[in-house]
Amino acid sequence: MSDRPSPPPLRPEDVLTQYGRQDATGFRNRPRPGVEEAISVIAGRLTAAEAHALVIRRGAYRPGFDVVRYTTVAALAEAGFRPQRDPTPAIPDHVLVFCEGEWNGEVADRFDSCFGMVASEET
């Protein structure tokens, strides 16, 4: 049993941050088959440097290469997704985003449409 208090439930207005890279890998918009059942995001509005430090935890942050994008719990829920807190020792504000049914190309596009513009610098 953890000594950490349980994080508060997600609220519709809560901002979620997704880390990505400005290269061919970009942002994950569907789970990796056989590896994941959901997509990881972080509760809160983090800068690219903050998200890099949590997600990558090694190597230097590279402005313009390490990037983030933002959405809200409400935007994901309205698009048919289910964000759920999933704290980890490394990322206490870790959130998993689930979708009922097959996560196909249409669902991946719908997931992408929940996010605003990509941010690469301190925002």
Image (cartoon, helix red, strand yellow):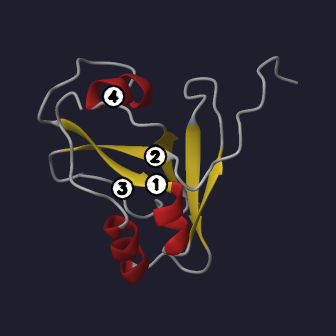
Nearest the camera: 75 or 98?
Answer: 75
Q: Amino acid at mark 1?
A: Thr
Which residue was labeled with disc 2?
Answer: 15
In the drawing, does residue 54 fall left or right of residue 58? right
* SS for dot 2: strand
Crowding near pointer 1: few (<14 within 10 Å), some, many (20+)? Answer: many
Which residue was labeled with disc 4?
Answer: 52
Nearest the camera: 74 or 119?
Answer: 74
Which residue was labeled with disc 3?
Answer: 28
Ranked by sequence position, the earlier of labels 2 and 3 is 2
Q: CA distance from mark 4 to mark 3?
A: 15 Å
- Residue most toward the right? 1
Q: Amino acid at mark 4?
A: His
Which residue was labeled with disc 1?
Answer: 72
In the drawing, does residue 69 fall left or right of residue 30? left
Q: Position of residue 102 (x, y in %)?
A: 54, 80
Q: Amino acid at mark 3?
A: Arg
Q: Verify CB contact (< 8 Å) between mark 4 and mark 3.
A: no
Q: Position of residue 115 (x, y in %)?
A: 33, 59
Q: Nearer the viewer, mark 4 or mark 2?
A: 2
